[in-house]
Image (cartoon, helix red, strand yellow):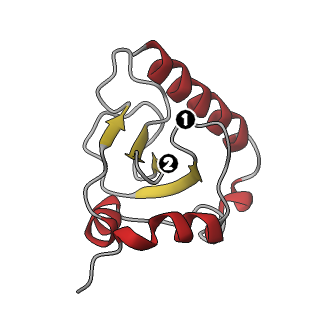
Amino acid sequence: MLMRTKSLLLKCLMLGFFLSFPSSLFAADVLPVIDPDQVIAKYGTPDIIDSTAYDKPRPPIVVKEFIYKKEDVMIVFVAADAPMGAPPPYSVWRLFGIEDAKGKRVLSVAEFKARMAKRIKQP
């Protein structure tokens, strides 16, 4: 629990730092809108779904994490449809990053696709 709290707190602090830059840096091509349900539809239910939406106190920037243990992948989203500190529900999420499941290394798109290839659900 403590590790999770430190990891999410660090992500919230990093995001807060980046959000202090001009909003033009966060165009759709930088932090794309991604529906977490579409990720589940494509790759299946994550082993762990974690969120700061109901933490007390709730951080100003809400983060949601999907962790796929076998693939060693963590997908991090940030709530994008509410002012800082607003309570749930959130309907728009932006992709913040993809990293290894322990949050120690950012994964490239190619590495993410290779790790998740066996999980892709056929339509």
Q: Residues within 10 Å of mark 1 (few under 14, many from 20)?
A: some
| Circle 2 Cα neighbour tier, 10 Å, few/some/many (<14 / 14–19 / ≥20) | some
Label 2 close to label 1 by CB (< 8 Å): yes
For residue 102, the mark is 1
Report the amino acid beneath label 2.
Asp
| Residue labelled with disc 2 | 72
Seen from the viewer's position, the closer of residues 94 and 42 is 42
Q: 106 above or below 37?
A: above
Looking at the image, residue 105 sits to the left or right of residue 82; the answer is: right
Residue at position x 29%, y 62% in the image: 40
Residue 49 is situated, as x and y percent measured from the top left of the image, at: 31, 42
Quadrant location, the N terminus: top left
Q: Amino acid at mark 1?
A: Lys
Real-space Cα separation, disc 2 to disc 1, in angstroms? 8 Å
> Residue 33: x and y, percent?
47, 65
In the image, farthest residue toward the bottom: 123
Q: Residue at x 51, y 42 (%)?
A: 101
- For marks 2 and 1, the one nearer the N-term is 2
Asked if residue 89 lies left or right of residue 17, the reply is left
